[in-house]
Structure formats: structure tokens, C-alpha cells
Image (spheres, grey):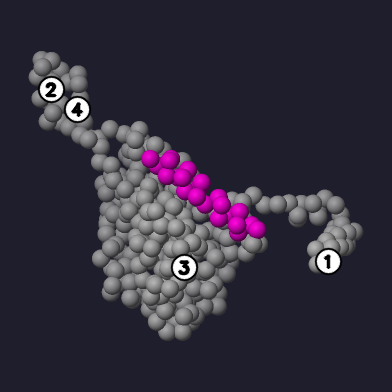
Amino acid sequence: MVETVRDEVRSEVLRRLIAERGVTDVARSMRTPLVEDIDLQHGTHEEIKAVERAVAPLARRLATRLAHRRRHGRRGRLDVRRTIRRSLAHGGAMLEPRFRPPRVGKPEIVLLCDVSGSMATFARFTLQLTHAIGGELANVRSFAFIDGIDEVTELFGPGADFEASLTAMASEADLVRGDGHSDYGQVFEEFATRFGSVITPRTTLIITGDARSNFRDSGADTFSAIADPARAVLWLNPERQRYWNTGDSVMAAYADMCDEVEEVRTLAQLERFVAALSYVANECDEDIDKYCAKVELGEGRILSCLEAQGTNIQNRCTQALEDVGLK
């Protein structure tokens, strides 16, 4: 009976819409969105389930791509001493250059994930993706926060069931210090005190959150101190950019300390961003150390530094920047 009434109401609404707007406009507005284009904050229950099913294959594709590049990647640097020694067998002609073994290392990723009420849906996907690709893409350490922060890396470790991990986080992670509403300033202060040493010059620091701190202190100076040692600082904000810095949003307070601040509302955007950070960190590590080590973080200055080097940077770094659309 309920389904019959629902169908009749839906048919009547559709009839009136067609009468007012025409068949073409109504058909366009009712188009089913691709799963990668579904808004992670406002999708329907069925759409959210479809996105969840897509996360694991997405993670495997990203991991496979990076693993392929590591297996079939570049040779190491020229080993001058061994090359000269080998040339003695050919009368001094350097016919067989020798190379050092390539330095294969995973970039370190530290994720700070806002899991407060307004961020709960988006946080689920960032944690799920991190859980799925962590073992392949990088050394990943994950921290969840509301108005307190706690490490949840072990809860989402290899072999852990994701749903069980979420349940464990809700019951075991110590994330609330006061009223249970977001307090970015307090969170950054606590992170600096308890976990600040995890940020190193090899770290890519990723913050996922809407930067809404309920009109509390932003803790921008503390965030600057946290971000300063990191190789790159990336902020993913699922809120539409036009709403940043309105009401209790303090996104501007952190933006200058970040290399990139991106609106990420869909799985497609998240895929591109994760692929970019892992791929570029691997392929451009030597060029960043050589040319951009003293460049101040913020406002994309590291990427601008790499682009300014022109043909000086290695081909693999140039290719990486082109592949992810940063050049």
C-alpha cells in the first residue's frame, strides 16, 4: 500500500514537472549521476552505498599504478667510481656505465581527519580510502579529531575490517575533550604536544575538514609550527569554496601554510588528488630536495618552484606533473 501511494505521488510530481519545464529539461535533471561524481556530503542512501562499493577497486587501481612505476621505474644515479673502474677493461673508454641502485622509498603520509558531525560522511570515505591503499602507497599514519585528537592508525591497519574499525574508533579513540564540537585550535595544540615528532621532511601532511571551528581560536600559529617541517601540506575541504571563510569557517587562517587547498566533494576529485600526491612525491623527490628545499610552504610555492626550473628537473618529474595536470 505504501509503495503504491509513493509511486502515485512520484508520477504526479513528474507529470507536473513536465508540464511546467518540458520533457528535455526534466530528463536532464533526472539523469543518474556517475558514481565518481556523486557529492560525498549530500548523496542519497543508495548513492552513498554505490560510492562505498567503488572505493576498494579505486584503491587497488591507484596502488597498481604506483607499484608499476616503482617496478619499472628509473635507474639510479650514475656511479662514477664504478664506471671509471669498469672503463679500464676497455682502455679507458666508458662503454658500460654503472648506476647505483635506485632509491625506492614510499612517501610518508600523515592524515588528520575531522570526524565531527558535519564531517562524518566525508570522513568515512577518506578513512576508507586511506585504509585500502595505505599498505601500497605509503607509510600512512592516521589521526581522527573532533575537539580532541587520537591516533587511529592501528585500527585501520592491514587486514582490519573497515566497518569494525569504524566501530572501534567510535568506542576506543579519545576524540572529545569538551562539548564534542569541532575545535581546530585545541586539536592542533594537542597534536603538536603529543604527536608533533611524526612530521618530518619526508612527510606529506593531509588535513580533511571544513575548517569550521565554532568561533573558537583557529590555532593558526600552532598549525604553522606543525606544517613547517613537512615536505608538503594539503588540505581537502568538502565544503563548496564559496562558503569558505563565512560564519565560523577559518579556512583563510590555514591556507597560507598549505601547498594546496582543494574543494573535494566527489570520489573523482579524491582519486585525482590522491594519485597526484603519491605519484608526484615519488617522482619529484630529488628535484624538490635539489631546487626547492628552501622554498617556503604555502600557496602552491613548491609546485611553482618546480615549474620555474623548466628543463632542469628530471624527465620523470616533468612527466609526473604533466600526468596529474599540474603542468
Question: Spatial distance from mark 3 to mark 2, Cα to Cα?
Answer: 60 Å
Q: Residue furthest right?
A: 19
Name the magenta segment's main secondary structure. Answer: helix
The span picked out in magenta is 46-67
Badge 4 marks a residue whose secondary structure is loop
Answer whether residue 86 is visible to the viewer in this image. Answer: yes
Mark 2 or 1 closer to N-term? Answer: 1
Mark 3 or 1 closer to N-term? Answer: 1
Q: Report which residue position mark 3 lands on.
A: 167
Question: What's the residue type where badge 1 is placed?
Answer: Met
**Position in image of residue 308 (x %, y %):** 37, 46
Q: Residues within 10 Å of mark 1 (few under 14, many from 20)?
A: few
Q: In which quarter of the image is the C terminus?
A: top left
Name the residue: 64% across, 49% down.
Answer: 34
Q: Are marks 2 and 1 in contact (CB under 8 Å)?
A: no
Q: Does the magenta stretch include residue 100?
A: no
Q: Are marks 2 and 4 in contact (CB under 8 Å)?
A: yes
Q: Is residue 57 magenta?
A: yes
Name the residue: 86% across, 60% down.
Answer: 11
Question: Spatial distance from mark 2 to mark 4, Cα to Cα?
Answer: 8 Å
Q: Which of 162 and 10 is in front in this view?
A: 162
Q: Report which residue position mark 4 lands on.
A: 98
Question: Spatial distance from mark 1 to mark 4, Cα to Cα?
Answer: 79 Å
The answer to whether residue 58 is left or right of residue 190 is right
Quarter residue 174 falls in: bottom left
Q: Which mark is residue 1?
A: 1
Name the residue: 43% across, 40% down.
Answer: 65
Q: How crowded is mark 4: few (under 14 residues within 10 Å), some or many (20 or more)?
A: many
Q: Do the residues labelled 1 and 4 touch (CB within 8 Å)?
A: no
**Position in image of residue 135 (x %, y %):** 37, 50
Mark 3 or 2 closer to N-term? Answer: 2
